[in-house]
Amino acid sequence: MPTAAIIHNPVSGRFPALPLIEHSVKLLHDYGWQAEIMLTEQAGDTKRLTQLARDKGKDAVFIAGGDGSLGKAANILKGSDTILGVLPTGTANVWAQELGLQYVKHPWTSALTDAVIAQIEGDVRSIDVGVCNEHAFLLWAGFGFDAHVVASVEPRQPLEKKFGKLSYAAKGLWASTSWTPTPFKIHTATRTYENDFLFSVVTNIQLYAGGLARLDPEARVDDGKITLWAFEGDHFLDAFVLASRVIQNAHFEHNETVMDLGTEFRIEAPRPIPMQLDGEVMGNVANAEIQIAPNALKVFKTTTANPTLFR
């Protein structure tokens, strides 16, 4: 009988999800899985409990949370045989969106049981993960303005989480007024870019900005490559224009956009700039080394997944 751990932060997300998670455990049992719930209590518990589940030989770890928690789990499960699954109880749930899963929008939703079915009845695939300064990321590594927004927005209060992306966007717009651009260099395999960049994002997936934008429609999670995007600008008003371009898919060939597909990149700044991994604040860095770890993580490929996300 396969075994699974469901790791959940009871204070995350928009609504209390523990009763829904308990129902998901029963459904896993119906599918022949033995599952247990492991609750986080303090910072660092997601990594600690994921490592405990991995070391116990669990066949799968389901993260009942958002993208930040998934990124922490990916950091632990990278290179192991334990499968990473998701029960989308976070706020944005971008990885879940890529898998075609609904997330918890109200307390009586069937989103979690639907997510269990879609994953258990799907396939198991090995995907790439990014590694930035020895920290793995599942979705993105962001530098500059986008990381500044994350640092300004998080953590959100429970009432703010109930408004989801609207609350995030409003606080992000306000945070943009305090942003001071910093020129930095981007080193790729073939050239170096140096400019006043608003921000740079290295992405492993297609969606971005809470799923509002399809930043990179050509991204594949299992092609052994990652894509670097960088956007020029020197004022917070440029961020508003850029956001409009990205949401309208008008950023691809703009002359103030840099795009490079590769296996490793280096960011170099004259002073430390904000960095985020999978929507989690990681402090400020003056240098960042980013590489791809091919086929390093096992995940459930759902029956509802974006058909172009996998090769």
Image (cartoon, rainbow, N blue to C red):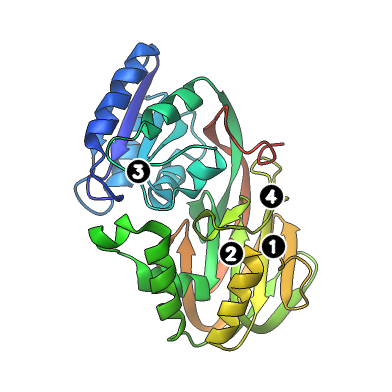
Question: In screen coordinates, is 311 left or right of 190?
Answer: left
Q: Position of residue 155 (x, y in %)?
A: 30, 64
Q: Position of residue 113 (x, y in %)?
A: 38, 27
Q: Secondary structure at mark 2?
A: strand
In the image, 265 versus 15, the foreground residue is 15
In terms of sequence position, does the residue under pointer 1 or pointer 2 come before the other? 1
The structure residue drawn at horizontal position 34% and vertical position 66%, both measured from the top left corner, is 154
State the CA–CA distance, disc 1 to disc 2. 28 Å
Amino acid on which the number 1 mark rests in the picture: Asn
Q: Which mark is residue 89?
A: 3
- Are circles 3 and 4 on residues that touch, CB within 8 Å? no
Q: Which mark is residue 249?
A: 1
Q: Which mark is residue 289?
A: 2
Q: Secondary structure at mark 1?
A: loop
What residue is shown with label 4? 219
- Are circles 4 and 2 on residues that touch, CB within 8 Å? no
Residue that lies at the very extreme toward the left in this rendered image = 41
Q: Position of residue 302 (x, y in %)?
A: 55, 29
Residue 172 shows up from this direction: yes
State the CA–CA distance, disc 1 to disc 3. 28 Å
In terms of sequence position, does the residue under pointer 4 or pointer 2 come before the other? 4
State the CA–CA distance, disc 2 to disc 3. 31 Å
